Structure formats: structure tokens, C-alpha cells
């Protein structure tokens, strides 16, 4: 038996904060590590001690195992928890931790190594009798093999993954997947297998000790994904026949026993529309979505990880599950703009009580360019699935999120979509419904009026008549303000006494009460710099004040391609140079930001007249990347 006293978490953000919470409850002191951009991050503020990893990029900081081990020894830690991502599934790092005399909070390095390559893991699982999809050799693939799914052999999170529906696109997709995998994991190996249309992503949480006990802690459904990355997860996976659940549990336990597994891990399966399960991979770490399993089984998986690492034996059988849990990942991203990640200051992150919120941010924190843009995980647990889904949608709809565009509205609409409500789940959900889920924004007029009234209100304790009458000497004249929201400019004209279809009941700088079409509505307002945030039951809006006289310098040359976010140029189309002909929609270059790769496309057919960047160059938001002159202009 080992008696741990101090724990270093070799990670950042939400997962580090979550692990520290359990460590403190168990009486352990906590040690954080941080890059320079994370010097004042919540996980650093939350720890008992913190050690700097000089630099900003993950390759220089959170992926430097040698620096992390030195930090643990210097801070007096006797154990290292890797969290998820970064070095969590790196067998070499696990061995180095143990060689330094520290306790590794994770499976044996040999088990990590066995599952590290998806191709080798599949061979191992085939020998253990776990059902598998047959691989396809890209060199001999035919039309009968389509569609194909290309996957990186190392790593996960959707990196190095492509769906191929046309043989003519196979080579280009292989090259792109290999390049992305090499950049993300240092290993460009890619393999191909049949792509299952409308399949479900179902996984089994396992927990094993060093004494031969392996728990299968139920199923999770993680089918709602964007770019092969999970968005909404739930436990148990709804609508599975009991025989299928048994098959999945038995296969997951067999996978764990095949590699003498210890600690927490997840075995992932693809379930076809007709109910056939196939092994995808085993994640030899804690999963992002572990809270839904914790809620259903009333367990703390991090506490169990620590106890297993100390040598404690698990009871022969796990507790019985109760109820249903659902988790939504709240991201700083714009789903309507190709899931574009957002950076900047998060002025407000407030989610109504009664739900579990795991986050690495508080009000005023900065969301930077170097890391994943997930702001929080919001989790609900209830006796039934319908109640858990309804509670989660209500909590997200009632949240106040100021400063950045988020996927909050997409999450609410997804949870309330008829297919999701009926548990008709598959990985193509967003391919089919994204346009509907991101379109039809609520009418901003009442919110814009509330913003204007809040701006003009001089003091919250002044009488309403004094506030409304003091805006101008001529009370009979309407007042005008202009705002921009979601790319559209709005002009609001309001009268001190009324507005068509809307009656003003009260107004202060932070709360405006209106009667809209006979219904009383409260609009919560937060003013910050040049932006005004308005939240109500009708929706959330961000308004940017429009100056009376626009700055002529805001104009750019026609055909200019500007960086949609800060990032690094990781690839430029082969042979692309000034003078090259281009066609509409042709990928010209690729930007990597916040763990995602983004294509910059030609806006029209014509000629590339300028290329201002090179591979490896870092660019700021709005930087001029290239210029395309349209054929008609030429």
C-alpha cells in the first residue's frame, strides 16, 4: 500500500480544477503547472502551489514530461495525475514518472502502450474476441468500400480523421489526415475502415484494481459530435436492448483484462443502426464525460483512481446505477461559422444553480489561442432522461455568458430537438440539422430597446419618469441608437413613454422590464466597453455600439482573405504562389488554433495576386493572409 500526501496534476483548465477538488477532499496538497499564458488561470489560483513551465505552446510546456517531473520533485509531490489530453496516454511519460520515484495515477505503462496505436489495439482486441470492423487497405480500395473513415493511429479527439466518399479524393484526404496527425501526435500513421452511416457512439466506463477486479460502470452515448468531437453525452445510453448492453459490458471487461488494466478507462464502440457493436478504441485515461457516470453511480472516479493507485482493492461489484445524467460541453465557438473558435475576455460565466458545472474559468478570465476553447461542462441528473434533458436545457438557456460567442444556443436547441428528445441518436445529427439549429435567431428588437433604455438610465434608484424624461428636452421626439449584432445593424427608435408593441415598465442600467405583446419580460443588461449584453427568456444578444461616423480605415481591398482567428499557418496548398489560378471554395491554406485546424478557402474564382504568409508563421486575428482577384475584375 502507498500513502499519498501531495498530488501534481500535469494538465490545465477544467480537468485540473476538477482533480484538485477531489484531492483536497481526500486531504492531499495540490500542485499545478502552468504555461506563461496560464500564469493567472483558475487552476493555478486553485492549487496550493504552482510551478511555471516557460513558454506558451503545448509542445514547450504541457507536453514537456521532463519539466513536469522536475516540477513535481521540486514541489514535493509524490504522485502525478495526467488528466486527459496532453501526456495522459503517453507510456514513456508514465514510465519516467515511475522511474523518478513518483506514483503514476493511471494504468500500467504497458497497458497504455498496448492501446496507444489504434491499429495494434484492434489486433489485440480481435485476439480477445471483441467485435471489430474489418480494415480497408487504401491502396486497393474500390467504390464498393465507400464511404471510408480515415483515422490517425495515435491520439484522438477527432484529429487526423476524414470521411471519404469519392475515390478521387482519397489521396488528398490521406495526405491531409497524415499531416494533421503528425502535427498533433508526432505520428503520421493513418488507417482506413468502413464509415458507418448513422451509427451511434456508445462507450463503457471501466475501473480496475491491481487485485483482479474489473468494473463495467454502465454505458454512455456520445453520438452528438462536431468534427468527430463530442458535444453532448449521457448515461446510460438510451434505447439499447439489454442483450446489447450485456455484450458491450462483457467486451469492455475483456478488453481491460487483455492488457492487465488498472485504474479508470473507457472502451468505445460504434453501434450500427441495426444494433451491431464494433470496437473503436480504448482510452487509457479519464474521459471528459466522466461526470455523467459519476452522477448515475454516485461515485467519484478521481477518488477511486487515487485509491487504486494506493493499492486499495475495489469491492467485488460496483454500486447499482440510478436515474439518468446528461452533459453538455459549452464552447467558445461559433457553430454557424464552421465552428470557429473564439478568443478574448470572458466577462461573465453564470449558470443557474441546481446543476453541476465543471469549469476552468471565472468572470474576467481570458480565453487564449493555444488551448481547447471549452468553457465548461454542465451536467444534470434526474430520475428520468426527459427530466435530466429538460433541466439541462433550462440551465443553459438561463445562463449569462458575456464577452464571447458560444455554442450555448446550439446546445439548447439540440436538447430540445424532436430527434434528441426521442433518443434517435447518431453521429450524423449535426450534418443533418446544423443549419436549422443555428438559423432563425430570436427577434433582437426588444433586447435592442432594452439595451438603449439601460444605456440612457442614469441611476437605478431614480424615479422612472425622471429617467425617461431627462434624456432630451423635447420629450415628443423619439431617441435613436444604433447597434450591430450577428453581422446585422439595427437602429432603435424609442419614445420616453412607449414603443410600438412594447410598453416600458422599468429601466435601470442593469435591468429593464418591458411588456412585450402583453407579456411582462425582464431583460438583464451588462454594459462593457463598446458592447452591451442582454439576457432574457426571449434569448441572449450581444450588441456593439455603432459609431455615428464609421472609420474609413475599416475598409479592405476586395478579395482580401483575413485571419478569422489568431493561429499558426500549418499548411499552404501545394504549388500556391502569386499568379496561381484558384477556383471558388478551393482550400488555399490551413490555420491551426485552439487544437483545431481551419481551412481558408478562395472566395471566388480568379488569380491569387498576393500571399502574405508562410508555413509555421503565427498570425493575429484580422491579419491579411492573401488576396484573390476575381476573374470579372481582371
Image (spheres, rainbow, N blue to C red):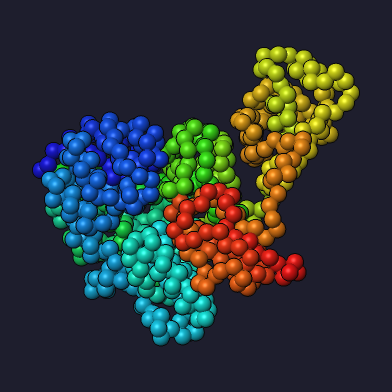
Please tell me which residue is depicted at 68% across the width and 52% down the height of the picture.
556
* Residue nearest the observer in this picture, 596 or 296: 596
Q: Residue furthest left?
A: 1
The location of residue 30, given as percent across then percent down, is 26, 34
* Residue nearest the observer in this picture, 138 or 69: 69
Left/right placement of residue 177 relative to residue 468 reads left
Q: Is residue 195 visible?
A: no
Rendered image quadrant of residue 383:
top left
The location of residue 471, given as percent across then percent down, is 79, 20
Rendered image quadrant of residue 222:
bottom left
The location of residue 598, given as percent across then percent down, is 52, 59
Quadrant for the C terminus in the image: bottom right
In the rendered view, would you say 445 is above or below 572?
above
Q: Is residue 108 visible?
A: yes
Please tell me which residue is depicted at 63% across the width and 61% down the height of the picture.
627
In the rendered view, would you say 625 is above or below 56?
below
Please tell me which residue is depicted at 66% across the width and 31% down the height of the picture.
523
Left/right placement of residue 166 relative to residue 309 reads right
In this figure, what is the number of numbered marks? 0
Quadrant for the N terminus in the image: top left
Please tell me which residue is depicted at 67% across the width and 38% down the height of the picture.
544
* Residue nearest the observer in this picture, 96 or 607: 607
In the rendered view, would you say 429 is above or below 100?
below
The location of residue 89, given as percent across then percent down, is 28, 56
Left/right placement of residue 583 relative to residue 101 reads right
Amino acid at each position: 500500500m502507498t500513502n499519498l500526501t501531495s498530488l501534481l496534476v500535469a494538465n490545465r483548465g477544467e480537468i485540473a480544477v476538477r482533480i484538485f477538488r477531489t484531492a483536497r477532499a481526500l486531504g492531499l496538497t495540490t500542485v499545478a503547472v502552468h504555461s506563461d499564458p496560464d500564469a493567472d488561470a483558475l487552476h493555478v489560483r486553485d492549487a496550493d502551489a504552482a510551478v511555471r513551465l516557460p513558454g506558451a505552446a503545448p509542445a514547450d510546456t504541457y507536453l514537456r514530461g521532463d519539466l513536469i517531473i522536475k516540477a513535481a520533485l521540486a514541489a514535493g509531490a509524490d504522485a502525478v495525475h495526467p488528466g486527459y489530453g496532453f501526456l495522459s496516454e503517453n507510456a514513456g511519460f508514465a514510465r519516467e514518472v515511475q522511474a523518478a520515484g513518483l506514483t503514476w495515477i493511471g494504468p500500467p505503462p504497458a497497458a497504455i502502450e498496448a492501446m496507444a496505436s489504434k491499429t495494434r489495439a484492434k489486433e489485440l482486441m480481435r485476439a480477445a474476441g471483441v467485435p471489430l470492423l474489418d480494415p480497408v487497405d487504401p491502396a486497393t480500395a474500390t467504390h464498393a468500400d465507400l464511404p471510408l473513415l480515415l483515422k490517425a493511429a495515435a491520439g484522438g479527439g477527432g484529429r487526423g480523421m476524414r470521411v471519404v466518399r469519392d475515390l478521387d479524393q482519397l489521396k488528398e484526404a490521406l495526405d491531409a489526415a497524415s499531416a494533421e496527425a503528425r502535427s498533433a501526435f508526432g505520428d503520421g500513421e493513418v488507417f482506413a475502415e468502413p464509415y458507418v452511416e448513422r451509427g451511434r457512439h456508445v462507450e463503457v466506463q471501466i475501473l480496475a484494481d491491481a487485485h483482479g477486479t474489473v468494473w463495467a460502470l454502465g454505458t454512455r452515448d456520445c453520438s452528438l459530435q462536431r468534427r468527430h468531437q463530442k458535444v453532448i453525452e449521457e448515461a446510460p445510453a438510451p434505447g439499447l436492448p439489454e442483450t446489447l448492453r450485456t455484450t458491450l459490458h462483457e467486451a469492455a471487461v475483456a478488453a481491460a483484462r487483455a492488457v492487465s488494466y488498472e485504474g479508470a478507462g473507457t472502451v468505445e464502440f460504434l453501434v450500427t443502426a441495426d444494433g451491431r457493436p464494433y470496437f473503436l478504441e480504448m482510452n487509457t485515461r479519464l474521459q471528459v464525460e466522466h461526470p455523467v457516470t459519476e452522477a448515475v453511480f454516485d461515485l467519484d472516479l478521481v477518488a477511486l483512481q487515487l485509491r487504486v493507485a494506493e493499492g486499495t482493492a475495489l469491492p467485488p461489484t460496483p454500486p447499482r446505477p440510478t436515474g439518468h445524467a446528461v452533459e453538455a460541453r459549452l464552447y467558445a465557438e461559433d457553430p454557424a461559422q464552421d465552428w470557429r473558435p473564439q478568443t478574448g475576455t470572458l466577462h461573465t460565466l453564470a449558470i443557474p444553480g441546481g446543476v453541476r458545472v465543471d469549469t476552468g474559468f471565472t468572470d474576467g478570465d481570458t480565453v487564449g489561442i493555444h488551448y481547447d476553447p471549452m468553457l465548461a461542462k454542465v451536467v444534470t441528473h434526474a430520475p428520468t432522461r426527459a427530466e435530466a434533458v429538460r433541466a439541462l436545457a433550462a440551465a443553459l438557456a438561463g445562463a449569462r455568458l458575456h464577452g464571447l460567442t458560444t455554442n450555448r444556443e446550439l446546445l439548447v436547441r439540440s436538447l430540445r430537438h424532436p430527434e434528441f428528445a426521442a433518443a434517435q441518436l447518431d453521429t450524423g445529427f449535426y450534418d443533418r440539422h446544423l443549419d436549422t439549429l443555428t438559423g432563425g435567431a430570436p427577434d433582437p428588437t426588444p433586447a435592442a430597446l432594452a439595451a438603449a433604455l439601460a444605456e440612457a438610465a442614469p441611476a437605478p434608484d431614480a424615479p422612472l419618469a425622471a429617467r425617461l424624461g431627462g434624456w432630451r428636452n423635447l420629450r415628443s421626439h423619439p431617441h435613436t441608437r444604433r447597434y450591430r449584432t450577428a453581422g446585422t445593424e439595427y437602429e432603435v427608435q424609442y419614445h420616453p413613454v412607449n414603443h410600438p408593441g412594447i410598453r416600458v415598465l422599468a429601466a435601470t442600467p442593469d435591468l429593464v422590464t418591458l411588456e412585450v405583446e402583453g407579456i411582462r419580460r425582464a431583460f438583464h443588461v451588462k454594459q462593457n466597453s463598446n458592447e452591451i449584453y442582454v439576457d432574457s427568456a426571449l434569448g441572449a444578444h450581444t450588441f456593439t455600439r455603432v459609431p455615428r461616423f464609421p472609420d474609413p480605415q475599416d475598409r479592405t481591398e476586395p478579395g482580401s482573405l483575413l485571419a478569422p482567428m489568431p493561429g499558426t499557418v500549418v499548411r499552404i496548398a501545394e504549388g500556391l504562389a502569386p499568379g496561381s489560378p484558384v477556383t471558388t471554395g478551393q482550400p488555399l491554406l490551413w490555420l491551426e488554433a485552439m487544437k483545431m485546424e481551419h481551412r481558408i478557402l478562395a472566395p471566388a474564382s480568379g488569380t491569387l495576386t498576393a500571399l502574405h504568409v508562410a508555413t509555421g508563421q503565427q498570425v493575429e486575428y484580422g491579419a491579411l493572409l492573401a488576396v484573390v482577384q476575381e476573374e470579372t475584375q481582371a
